[in-house]
Amino acid sequence: MSFLEVTAFLANGFVFSLIIFAVTLLCGVPLGLPIAFCSMSRYKPVKAVSKVIVWIVRGIPLMLQIFIIYYVPGLLFKTPIFSNIDRYIISNFNIPNEGLLRMLLINAGSLVAVLIAFSINYACYFSEIYRGGIESISKGQYEAGYVLGLTKSQIFRKIVLKQVIKRIVPPMSNEIITLIKDTALANCIMIPEIIKQAKELAATKAMIWPLFYTGVFYLLFVGLLTILLGRLEKKLSYFN
Amino acid sequence: MSVLEVKGIMKSFGKTEVLKGLDFSLEKGEVLSIIGSSGSGKTTLLRCLNFLEFADKGTISVNGKTIFDGASLKKLTDNEIRENRLHFGLVFQSFNLFPQYSVLENITLAPTLLNRGSEEEIKAEALGLIERVGLSDKINNYPCELSGGQQQRVAIARALALKPDILCFDEPTSALDPELTGEVLRVIRDLKDEDSTMIVVTHEMEFARNVSDKVIFMADGVIEEMGTPDEVFLNPKSEKTKIFLNKDIEKV
């Protein structure tokens, strides 16, 4: 296999990494907000449930959570839901013989399981960042809003939110950079993400260097993220 | 008829009684200074007037209408509280400007959200207020670019933008160094000339003496002495007032 062929082969794997990355952000970023509000709720039971969930999700390895999401529904309902999705797609769709589309279709079920596990996991981490951000806003900002006759929701949307966003950009950047590297965990249920692809080459073609070459993909992507997040941080630096 | 009438206000935090039944009234255009040592309940009183705290007992009436009655607290909805609040404006010790908004936006934000007029009207009004507090060259600056005194003047303009019946100041110069205190006090004094009704909690005795129409000396949650500045400062009747005022002189 030539260098270009290896690159293309690995790039297909990186598409999976990027899908997991994008969907996790798309679901996890908004999902974190209600969890954060529950963790700050005045109602003790709501608060307790939310705190326990966050404790569990942050307390056990993400890889284990992927296994749980993938296998436990099958144990509970006596039928492997996610592999059934794969089977359904394989028997009902015209699967091409090779290429990225084939990889996506035959792995759709496991991919859904991974996406659920990642979204819940990251939502919990994000919720704690949101909570810290919201609680760091001084009481005076709320009171200034109250005495100006604003409603609670106006105060949150028009006064507090942007200050919270400014404060959470650095910790969120950290999590987002960790996320792209965490996508490698998907290979524990045979999702052909980039490292799985490289291991495949090692196993079938006795090529070890592609495994190290995968680092370049991550580095380039993290570089891009760093630039984008840095810009966002700079854009919000006009106020304190 | 008095603009403000406060009767029997009481407030406790847990077992600590902070306000032990206060009565006073204020006429339109009057400036009331509240003095007293820390912990005497001055700030709590202002916070009760602005509904940041709810008194346990007593009534607050504005222009003859009772807007708060400790006996029927639970009947007030969030909307009623918000409407009642708007009779009062509050300028905080620590300014509490909104950092992400410019000077102009800080002032126009609330009138815009409360639909107090068209965009142009609100802006024109805000520009007028900014001129009154002497910051016309700073309209597009952000709070972090202003000195403490300038920030406090913006905060005053922000409170005035909603045209409250009574404007309250909670130690407006306590967070400022002496150099900046003057510019804020001057703005408040100018407001008096324009017939604003004001309540000023302050440690600036000179200011209380020269600007107010009425002075209240508070100690341990009660009004220890109330009267014109001359009465309170020159002929205090209560022992506590005498001691407090003497301390203030000794300090210098």
Image (tube, coloured by chain):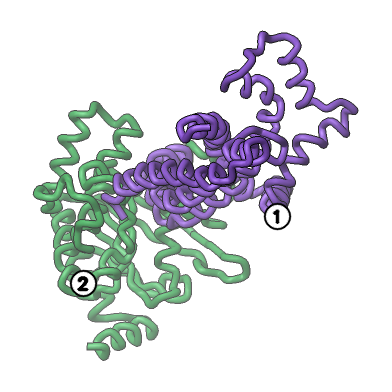
Q: Are marks 2 and 1 on the same chain?
A: no
Instruction: Indicate the secondary structure of the residue bearing disc 2.
Output: helix
Residue at image position (53%, 51%) is A129
Question: What's under tag 1, amino acid-wise?
Answer: Gly
Q: Is residue B98 or residue A108 the one in the foreground?
A: A108
Rendered image quadrant of residue B185:
bottom left
| Identity, as a three-letter code, of the amino acid under mark 2 | Arg
Q: Which residue is mark 2?
A: B209
For residue A146, the mark is none
Chain A, colour shown? purple
Distance from Cα at disc 2 to Cα at disc 1: 63 Å
Q: Chain of mark 2?
A: B
Q: Position of residue A114 (x, y in %)?
A: 67, 35
Residue density around tag 2, few if under 14, some if 14–19, many if 20 or more, within 10 Å? some
Q: Residue at x 56, y 45 (%)?
A: A211
Chain seen in green: B
